[in-house]
Image: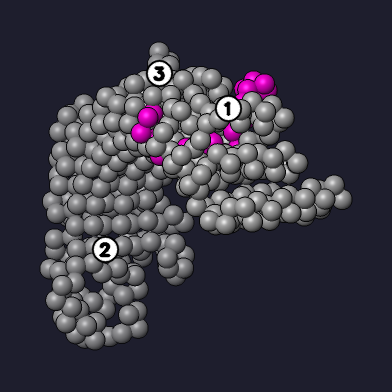
Amino acid sequence: MEYLPVEVIGNILSRLGAARNVVIASATCRKWQEAWRNHLHTLTFNSNDWPLYHDISASRLEILITQTIFQTRGLQCLSIILDDVDEFSAAPVIAWLMYTRETLRQLHYNVRTAPNINILEKCGRQKLEVLTLAHNTIMGVEPSYHKFPCLKSLSLSYVSISALDLSLLLTACPRIELLNLVSLDIVMSDSQATMELTTNSLKDIYVEAVSLDKLILEADALEKLHLKDCTFEVFELIGKGVLRFLKIDDVSVIHLDIGENAENLEIIDVSNFTIMWAKFYHMISKSSKLRKLRLWGVVFDDEDEIVDIETISSCFPLLNHLSLSYELKEASIHYGLQGCFVLENVVELELGWTVITDLFSVWVSGLLERCPHLRKLVIHGVVSETKTHEECHNLANFTSSVVKLMRKYLQVEVQFEYE
């Protein structure tokens, strides 16, 4: 499209009667001046998608983007992602936002300006439903409950914001359902050791690469909680028990409390995490609706702790997908598989190792015996480039043992995934 004359572009667009979304690279801006202004609802400028952005000066880009935006009417989605571009002047950027604010439903914004622009002030009290901000500073949020009356999704990445402003911002979004917080620079006041976030509408929150002493999240409607690569001394969730999905990945936390939110959990996914099994089990023990449990790469706080599979079987009767990977010890086999329990509904089983030993073969065999309706077995392993004779011997023995097992369990599909 970049090399087509404007007449051809206009002819193509005129034949697309249902067209609503067109992505325009800046080099084509001057070529579509007459092409369907009233039908263009989505406009995207992304420096990652088009390398030629790096050969154009910031001032030239300002002109091209300004000319493009001012040729639209009724723009609903504006995406300006300029990661590697020098700072823009504040004036043209403000003009873009003011020109589109009355019709805009989505804004994806990553633009550096001098001086910094208060994006929230320019976009507030409008029809905006989705707001994504990156590499910006937010300060001085007004405590106005109706600041963003229509906003349903808010994503902040590499944003500098105070704990108070983040709390006020969430309060200013009475209909928010999705919140993404990634690599935030959170400023705490001298008298403030706890960040408290309160929302009645939030359903889904994703927090990555955030470090805080104490975070208290009060969200009565929360259904999905995902924490990744975070550090907390204390994390507390207060809600009305509608949480269905809990994922914790590479998180360091001394005290984790989800309160009374475990009863409706259907998926629990914990990886690269140090746990006290007795305390963690107590937290999730009321999850009678649990269908998927994943404990992957977990480390026990007490070296004598084990995962009691019999207890898992009795407390999670609906469980159909079980994934386990942790350091196996003789006690894990002896005590973890004791009893006559059966994982009646488990149809998919994932097991993994970091260092292959004979214990792993015994563990796999013991779990297979207790899954009478198993349909799929996935084995994850780590195979080093330099293997000792003992490692090769153990791997060969394990392979032979799996072959023997599969002759016994012909109905089970076996899949190997090695790193």
Q: Residues within 10 Å of mark 3 (few under 14, many from 20)?
A: some
Say which of 78 and 283 sits in front: 283
Name the spot of residue 311 as percent of width and height, x first: 51, 26
Q: Residues within 10 Å of mark 2 (few under 14, many from 20)?
A: many
Say what secondary structure mark 3 lies in.
strand
* Amino acid, disc 3: Thr
Say which of 322 and 271 sits in front: 322
When the figure is inspected, residue 76 is found, relative to residue 156, above or below; the finding is below
Q: Is residue 304 magenta?
A: yes
Residue 43 image label: 2
Q: Which residues are magenta?
A: 287-307
The residue wearing badge 1 is 339
> Cα distance, mark 3 to mark 2?
40 Å
**Residue 95 seen from this side:** no
- Label located before the other in sequence (3 or 2): 2
Say what secondary structure mark 1 lies in.
loop
* Quarter that holds the N terminus: bottom left
- Give me the residue at 37% from left, 56% from top: 81
